[in-house]
Image: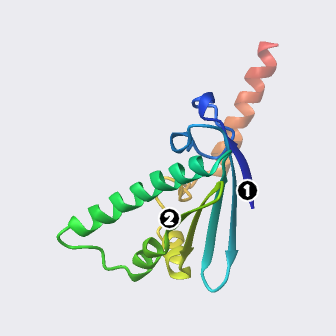
């Protein structure tokens, strides 16, 4: 679970995990949850001050989803990964009274693929082998120089 407040008037000082204020004209509270039911189910509800604001936020998200889907269909060779297709097909946005509700199901296979393809920038770096005797001499020299400088 995660609960955070979106303050559009605050600009970049949004108190949530991302700057989603471009979706909202007025403050909103977002309640997000994740649960496992054979796939990872994600749900985020943006609670707004009025039905109109919720409807506008849902329409903006729907526009982004439709743009993405249109771009995907325009590519001559669309992706063939069934897990990714299942994920994007599961993305839904609805307006329910004063709430905009986004849902998605992330297949376990997609999570496995994402975790298996760890970017090199966050993968552990191999440490060069060192000569511990040489390191010991260098440490002793540094200590001696520090003691002499006092």
Q: Is residue 16 above or below residue 7?
A: below
Residue 85 % position (x, y): 40, 77
In the rendered image, which quarter contains the N terminus? bottom right
Residue 64 % position (x, y): 40, 55
Local crowd size for mark 2, using a 10 Å CA cut-off: few (<14), some (14–19), many (≥20): few
Q: Is residue 37 left or right of residue 85?
A: right
Q: Is residue 102 above or below residue 35?
A: above
Quadrant in the rendering for residue 148: top right
Q: Secondary structure at mark 2?
A: loop
Residue 144 % position (x, y): 77, 25
Residue at the location (37% across, 79% down)? 81
- Viewer-side residue, 81 vs 51: 51
Q: Secondary structure at mark 1?
A: strand
Q: Residue furthest bottom?
A: 38
Local crowd size for mark 1, using a 10 Å CA cut-off: few (<14), some (14–19), many (≥20): few
Q: Give the residue pinned by disc 1.
A: 2
In the rendered image, which quarter contains the C terminus? top right
Q: Residue furthest top?
A: 150
Residue at the location (66% across, 39% down)? 27
Q: Is residue 16 left or right of residue 116?
A: right
Residue 76 image label: none
Quadrant in the rendering for residue 40: bottom right
Residue at the location (66% across, 48% down)? 48
- First in residue order: circle 2 vs circle 1: 1
- Viewer-side residue, 15 vs 53: 53
Q: Is residue 68 left or right of residue 18?
A: left
Q: Give the residue pinned by disc 2.
A: 118
Frontmost of labels 2 and 1 is 1
Q: CA distance from mark 2 to mark 1?
A: 25 Å
Residue 32 % position (x, y): 68, 60
Q: Are marks 2 and 1 in contact (CB under 8 Å)?
A: no
Quadrant in the rendering for residue 101: bottom right
């Amino acid at each position: 679970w995660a609960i955070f407040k979106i303050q559009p008037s605050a600009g970049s000082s949004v108190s949530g995990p991302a700057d989603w204020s471009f979706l909202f004209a007025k403050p909103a509270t977002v309640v997000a949850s994740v649960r496992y039911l054979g796939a990872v189910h994600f749900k985020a509800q943006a609670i707004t001050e009025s039905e109109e604001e919720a409807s506008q936020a849902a329409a903006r998200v729907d526009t982004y989803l439709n743009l993405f889907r249109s771009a995907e269909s325009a590519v001559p060779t669309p992706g063939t990964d069934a897990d990714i297709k299942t994920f994007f097909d599961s993305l839904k946005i609805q307006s329910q009274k004063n709430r905009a509700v986004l849902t998605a199901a992330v297949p376990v296979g997609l999570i496995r693929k994402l975790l298996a393809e760890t970017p090199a920038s966050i993968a552990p770096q191999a440490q060069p082998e060192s000569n511990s005797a040489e390191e010991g001499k260098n440490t002793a020299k540094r200590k001696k120089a520090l003691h002499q400088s006092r």
